[in-house]
Image (cartoon, helix red, strand yellow):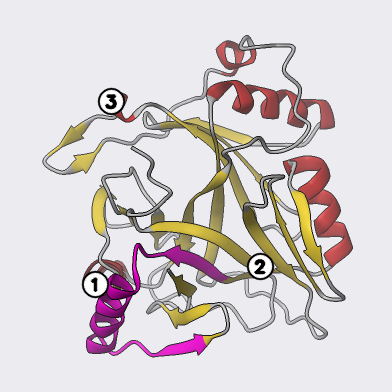
Amino acid sequence: MNFHHKPVIHTGPVKLIVSDLDQSISFYQDVIGLVQLSRNEDTAVLGTSEKQALLELKQPEQLNAKPERSTGLYHFAILLPDREHLAAFVRHIAALKIPVGSADHLVSEAVYLDDPDGNGIEVYRDRHPDEWQWENGQVKMTVDPLNVKELLRLKPDLTWEEAPAGTVMGHVHLHVTNLEETERFYVEGLGLKVVCRFGNQALFISDGDYHHHFGLNTWMGEGAPPTAANSVGLVHATLHFPSQAVLDQRINQLHKLGAKTNKRKSGLFVEDPSGNGLLLVV
């Protein structure tokens, strides 16, 4: 099953505030392998050569300082179509001598790095869903060491030129202020389902039995304040719905929960209880 197309509710492009647009474009092209799809004076859209948009970057006229402790982006996660391309990406990063973290999550294999503004990035590949372990509606995920040596033996001649066809925005992981009200917003409001919990500090939610389209954590501390406007970090993550009827139903539920929605040219904007922006689209 494809977890990143209709009829599944799924994540789409992420919009970020950056401090230096040219520097960020160079990073995402040269390091991550994205293609510039459009550009104006203060904004750029990057994605794949298939015209699949993944990121929108904006440099504001006035940049505000980002608090050390706030809600907002933990990381966005770029999903590659196969393990061989993850291996090629790891070789590419190693050649550039860029420091990364890595993990085997049972459902996936991942590497982690930051962009020039400290925005977290995950690049990963999924194991086949038949390999995922479910119990009582919850998927088992861990943070185990990634077997890098085994990974790098895959197709050693495959080089990383750009993000391959089939690359999508796999999920988005956010810092939030309170898990209980956050769960209510994403489950009762947006219609997603909790599929994994890490104690009382993090939960993972999805549609269509994916391992997660959103990660939500309180690792910045309960009650962490929202990120200041026009500071580096998340403006919004995009969430795709299968039809206007489904989206209208979710909007009604959000309004019942007290959430305020605002129509934008590209979709409907709403903030979760922690001030994290979401763009709801069909």
Which mark, by number, is residue 184?
Answer: 1
The residue carrying mark 3 is 130
At x 20%, y 43%, the residue is 138
Which corner quadrant of the image does residue 53 belong to? Answer: bottom right
- Residue 238, image x and y in percent? 50, 66
For badge 1, the amino acid type reads Arg
- Residue 97, image x and y in percent? 81, 31
Which one is closest to the eye, mark 3 or mark 2? 3
- Residue 234, image x and y in percent? 60, 69
Crowd rating for badge 1 (residues with CA inside 10 Å; few <14, some 14–19, many 20+): some
Range drawn in magenta: 236-263
Which mark, by number, is residue 16?
Answer: 2
For badge 2, the amino acid type reads Leu
For badge 3, the amino acid type reads Asp
Which mark, by number, is residue 19?
Answer: none
| Near-viewer residue (15 or 12) | 12
